Image (tube, helix red, strand yellow):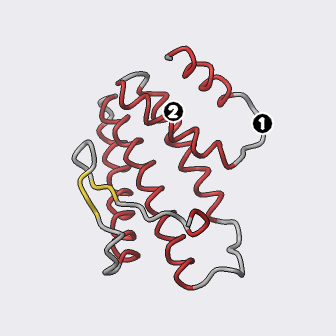
Amino acid sequence: MIQQGAVKLRALLQPRELSASDLVNYLTVAEALSKRGLQHERQVEMAQKYLAQLEVESKIGESDFFTKQDAETHYYYRASRRNQGLDLEADGYLRLKQSEEAQITLAQMDESLQDLKTLAGDKQMRTVRPARNGMSSTNIAPPFWHR
C-alpha cells in the first residue's frame, strides 16, 4: 500500500499539464502523509501545490449558468477546500518545528475561516466544527454539480 502511494506521488511530481484530478491527488497525498506522520516536507509541498491549483481555478471565469444560490455554494465550497489545504500545510510546518511558517499559515487559515463564516451565514448545512487536530474545519455542502 505504501509502495502504491509512492508510485502515485512520483507520478504527481512528473512535469505535465495539470488536470482537475491533480487537485484531489495533491490533497489525498498530503492527507495520507499527515495521517501517517511521514515526510513532512512532502506534505507541505503537496499542500502548497493544492493551494496553488485552487488559486488558478479561482481565477477562471464563473459560468453564466450559476444561480445566486449555486454561486454562493460554489464560493463556500472553494473557501472550505482552501481551508483544508491550509490545515495540512500548517500541520506539516508544525511537525517540522517551523513555527514562523506555521504562524503565517495559521493567520491565513484564520482569514479563511472568517470568509467561511461570512459565506455560511445562517445556513445549517454550513457549520464550523473542530477538526482532527484541534483547528476548525467545516461541514462541506456538496458543490452544485454533485446534486
Q: Quadrant of residue 111?
A: bottom left
Q: Is residue 62 shown left or right of residue 37?
A: right
Q: Is residue 41 shown left or right of residue 11?
A: left
Q: Earlier in the sequence, mark 1 or mark 2?
A: 1
Quarter of the picture containing the C terminus is bottom right
- Give amino acid for label 1: Arg
Of residue 96 and residue 113, the one placed in the foreground of this image is 113
**Can you tell which mark lies on residue 76?**
none
Q: Where is residue 16 in the image (x, y as percent from the top left)?
A: 77, 36
Outermost top residue:
3
Outermost bottom residue:
68
**Can you tell which mark lies on residue 16?**
1
Q: Which residue is drawn at 35% across and 24% down?
A: 37
Q: Which residue is drawn at 54% across and 22% down?
A: 5
Q: Tell me: residue 20, above or below residue 6.
A: below
**Can you tell which mark lies on residue 29?**
2
Outermost front residue:
147
Nearer to us: label 1 or label 2: 2
Mark 1–mark 2 Cα distance, whole angstroms, equals 18 Å
- Give amino acid for label 2: Val
Q: Label 1: state its secondary structure.
A: loop
Q: Residues within 10 Å of mark 1 (few under 14, many from 20)?
A: few
Q: Where is residue 26 in the image (x, y as percent from the top left)?
A: 56, 39
Q: Is residue 58 shown left or right of residue 87?
A: right
